[in-house]
Amino acid sequence: MSQAATTNASFLERAPVLLRDWLTGSLPGPARWLANALIAIVAILAVFGLLFAFLTLAERKILGRVQNRPGPNRTGWFGLLQPFADGIKMLTKEDIVPRSADPFLHFLAPVALLGFSILTFAVIPYGRYLAPVELNAAVLYFFAAGSGAELAVFMAGWASHNKYSLLAAMRALAQLISYELPLLLSFVPVALATGTLSTTGIVAAQAGWRWNLIPHWFVFTPWGAAAFAIFMVSALAESNRSPFDLPEAESELIAGHLTEYSGFKYALFFMAEYFGICALSGMAVTLFLGGWQAPLPALSFIPSYVWFAAKLLALLLGFIWIRATLPRLRIDQLTRLAWKFLVPLALVNLGTAAFWSLTLGWAGPLQLVRWALALGLVAVPALLLGRGLSAGIGPRTYRYA
Amino acid sequence: MNSVLALIALATIGTAVTALAGRNLLHSVLLFAVSWAGIAAFFLWSGAEFAAFAQALVYIGAISMAVLFAILLTRHSRDDFAPEPALAGRAFAAVLTGTAVAGVLIWAVASSPLAAAPSPVPAVTVRSLGWQLMGPPAAALLATGVLLTVALIGAVVIAAGERPSKPGDPP
Amino acid sequence: MSPLQLCLAFSSVLFAVGLAGALARSNAILVLLGIELMLNAANLNFIAFWRYGPATSPSTGVIFVLFSIAVAAAEAAVGLALIIAIYRHQRSIRLPEAARLKG
């Protein structure tokens, strides 16, 4: 978290940093740095832990309402104590480890997965002065930490000594590797536009408003909208989230690579999945939605971390909505979507972003030409690829058993 | 500073030795992943952030996956990971060779007049790295891109193999 | 020993470990991993000289390492594909058996 004591931002804005400085101000140099880091870690874990708990509840309630039923509403008011009841249940369940399983790896897999998911939280700027670690290559760190999770998925599948778990783990790995590529490629135009990999730099590059009305967020540019869409689809797949949740689908290989896990380790896997969703949504907010910045100048009095939270919650609710609506994809449909649709689109998007930044000087009516060309470069390949890849609508045939 | 370096060196070399001497192939690969993480930690300690994260992303995130897939595709049965018992004579000769090479290198390092004065960390940002990559090494960059594409296509072709000519043939 | 010499000693030991492993094992995948370890040791050397060596241009060492990592990844991919092809031919990945390929 950066120094903020001498700026003239509003008190609410500086409140978290002032609180932290008050807590650690009396410590000497290196101990103070360590205490600051510990406070940041505890704050992130507390906030995202609670968010995870209430996100599970929100998901079940929203899924329920979409499916015309109330969702959990018995434990506490409107089911608000449900996450804690689930936590107690998970903690008190018997921890079953198969006899022929590899005990060390079986234990290590959920821990490693959760560890890598939490590592990715370190570089997301949660507010104007609330970036836990400021790295020069922050986004690369984010993707490197996220890719370590794949190793943990394999460990889980293999250590269970169950051929169905192994098969499911290999499918999950294939999905994770396939969608790593569009995820990274959709970020590259952002690096092109801002010239930096630092998350605070990317948020700062999206500052300001055009005509005091439309923010300079990248999602409001043609290439940014396409990149945002590709990033969100890839984030859905990277976190094993519906409609890409084949690895953990109950109707498929029981629970996939999680079959042999019970009790708290199962809860850890789900915590890791939700943390992954939160981290990827946080990164999407940072890269495309302007981070902690307000959408209108008149609303800038609201503190930056409130705006970040609002955007994050909007994306998370979008994830839940998609889960409620779309059916699951098969593994071959998944991988075909990644390799044949998203990767070429992301590459074309890179060209569009290059065109956009090269034509920055066009003014007046040429702006309309620029927008038209950019929108065409984004929409036409998407339509053509989509048409070309879909199986089309054929005559309906009826087959009787 | 030196204690951090000693810790990183111990972790990296220790896991590498355990991995190469081990019986269980999958444990070896996972220990190698820890060793590569140790090397990434060394890069971070030296101040080369970009190289550290690139090392983590490529080695732990990609090469380990490829090795794991290759292991699982090249075994007979469920537990056929234990490699063959090491031939004692060959292992001894290899360790002897390794020790000799290490001895020669360390003697060369210790006896050469390298600068002993500590120098400040070279300031390199990702932006300056990018600008410099577009300069003289640009041709090498393009060649590396071509190399990676060719390697990808070649690996797919080699690993996929031909279709069996008769139904009884192994795939 | 100066920090530079310590780093170089570290990378020398790692290189020797990789060499010994590549020579001792007859499982093709472990040999490949030993070779990868040697490449990593060379990368350590590059970064050690970049950090402590006489100052040349500020980012040459890092650029070398990036290229080296890319080449190592390509080589690992092709090597693993070759191992899969050899397995298809002789149903095991022991290197002494692959010596039959020389006819």
Image: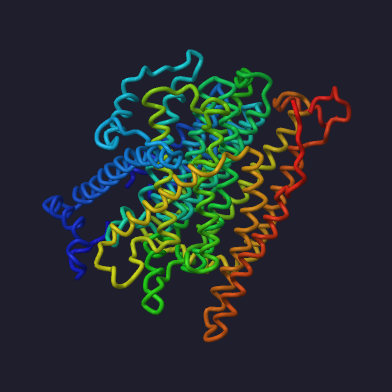
Residue at far top of view: A99
**Residue A324 at x, y percent in the picture:** 48, 42
Which residue is at a point 77% across and 38% down the rendered structure image?
A397
The quarter holding residue B11 reads top left
Q: Nearer the viewer, residue A71 or A312?
A: A71
Q: In this view, does B137 lie above or below A254?
A: below
Give the tally of numbered discs: 0
**Quadrant of the image containing the N terminus of chain A:** bottom left
Q: Which of B113 and B92 is in front in this view?
A: B92
Residue at far right of view: B166
Q: Is residue A190 visible?
A: yes
Q: Can residue B107 be seen in this view?
A: no
Which residue is at a point 72% across and 43% down the rendered structure image?
B155
**Residue C36 at x, y percent in the picture:** 59, 40
**Residue B97 at x, y percent in the picture:** 59, 32
Q: Nearer the viewer, residue B63 or A260?
A: A260
Q: In this view, does B90 lie above or below A392?
A: above
**Residue B64 at x, y percent in the picture:** 56, 38
C28 relative to B59 in the view: left or right: right
The quarter holding residue B123 reads bottom left
Q: Nearer the viewer, residue A6 or A232?
A: A232
A283 relative to A396 in the view: left or right: left
**Quadrant of the image containing the C terminus of chain A:** top right
